[in-house]
Amino acid sequence: MKKSMRGLARVIVAEAEGKTPAQLELFMKETIAYLAERGMLGRWRDLERDIHEAWKEKFGVSKITIATAHPLTGKTKTILQELAQGAELQEVVDERLMGGALIRMDERRIDGTVLGSLTRLKQALLS
C-alpha cells in the first residue's frame, strides 16, 4: 500500500503542473473523492508526505521561505519565482534581521543576515 501512495503522489504532482488554481482545486476534490471511494482517507498524511517528496524530486525544493528586514521588490520577487519554479515562495518581513536574508528551503537553512553574521563572529571570538 505504501508503494501505491508514492505512485499516486507522483501522479498528483505530474497532473498539478500547469493547472490554474481553479483547475487544481477541482483536481484535488476529485483526488479526495477517489481516496474516499477506496477507504483511503485515513492515509491522507502519508499521501501528503509523499506528495511533498515527489515535488522535491521533480522540482528540487517544495517550499522556500525568505525572511528579510524589508519587503522584497517586485523585480526580486519575479527573479526568485523564475529561479524557483514549482516551489511555493513565502516572504516574511522581520525587522529584527537588520539586513540580509534568511532563506529556508524545505529543511535547509541559509543565514545571510547581518544578525547571523554578527552572531557567528561573536562565537568565533569567544572560542
Image (cartoon, rainbow, N blue to C red):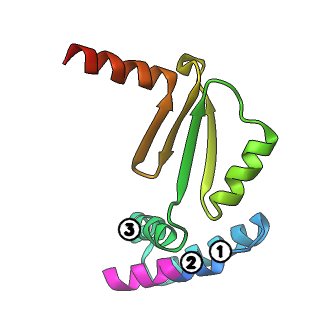
Q: Position of residue 31 (x, y in %)?
A: 58, 77
Query: Which element type, helix, strand or loop, lies under badge 2?
Result: helix
Is residue 20 rendered to the left or right of residue 29?
A: right
Identify the image quadrant of residue 87: bottom right
Q: Nearer the viewer, mark 3 or mark 1?
A: 1
Q: Residue at x 63, y 64 (%)?
A: 86
Q: Is residue 7 magenta?
A: yes
Taking 85 as reference, is 6 above or below it? Answer: below
Amino acid bearing label 2: Ile
Residue toward you, 49 or 92: 92
Q: Which quadrant of the figure has residue 46?
A: bottom left
What whole-number distance in Å separates the C-alpha atoms at marks 1 and 2?
Answer: 6 Å
Mark 2 and mark 3: span between their CA atoms?
A: 14 Å
In the image, residue 67 lies at what x, y percent? 57, 33
Q: Is residue 70 left or right of residue 112?
A: right
Residue type pointed to by label 1: Ala
- The answer to whether residue 127 is above or below residue 31 is above
Q: Quadrant of the C terminus?
A: top left
Contact between marks 1 and 2 (CB within 8 A): the answer is: yes
Label 2, on which residue? 12
Badge count: 3
Q: Residues within 10 Å of mark 3 (few under 14, many from 20)?
A: some
Quadrant housing residue 75: top right
Residue assigned mark 3: 46
SS type, badge 1: helix
In the rendered structure, which segment of residues is drawn in magenta?
1-10
Which dot marks residue 16? 1
Please, what is the three-letter code of the amino acid marked with disc 3?
A: Asp
Task: State yes or no: residue 32 in magenta.
Answer: no
Report crowding for label 1: few under 14, some 14 to 19, many 20 or more residues within 10 A (C-alpha).
some
Q: Is residue 51 above or below residue 4?
A: above
